[in-house]
Amino acid sequence: MFSGEWTPPCGSCCTKKYATLVQIPWRVFCKKGCTADGDTWDECIGKCTEICYKDPVLEDRQWSAYIDRSPGEDSYSLECFNACVSGCGFRFDIPVEKVEEIKPDRPSKPPPPEIKRATSSDSTKRGEDVPCTSA
């Protein structure tokens, strides 16, 4: 096996933090934070936002910014962002407490529209209008 000098220290920290099999996607995003463009902590966080969230897909349609880059659960983009920011923290030697305070600078998704259902009294009225077909 290779000695420790062959692996970048930031990537090794990501591998240790996201060691389990189910955490492999987050390990990848952590390592993207390690290698993100930008020479400062703030620039690195900005790159994490670009990696994990999309800008508005349709020009002049801000609502299209709610489409997340990570498919699946709504939490995936947030987990991607947190993993990437962890990589930035490892890269710039930022204390874990400060890294955990960072939240994405994204608007929250609007709540799903309410579905109006007919009340039970309306359905009984409709039932009375149906003629009986029994013998």
Image: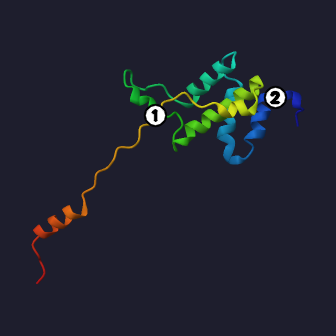
Q: On residue 9, which mark appears?
A: 2
Q: On residue 95, which mark appears?
A: none
Residue type for callout 2: Pro
Q: Where is residue 46 in the image (x, y as percent from the top left)?
A: 60, 22
Q: In which quarter of the image is the N terminus?
A: top right
Residue 16 vs residue 1, the one in the foreground = 16
Residue 72 sits above or below residue 58 on the image: below
Query: Disc 2 to disc 1, how far (Cα)?
Result: 34 Å
Residue 59 sits above or below residue 115 on the image: above
Q: Position of residue 4 (x, y in %)?
A: 88, 31
Q: What element carries label 1?
A: loop
> Between disc 2 and disc 1, whose residue precedes?
2
Label 2 Cα neighbours within 10 Å, binned few <14 / some 14-19 / many ≥20: some
- Which residue carries the number 1 mark? 67
Q: Quadrant location of residue 65?
A: top left
Q: Tell whether 57 sits left or right of 12.
A: left
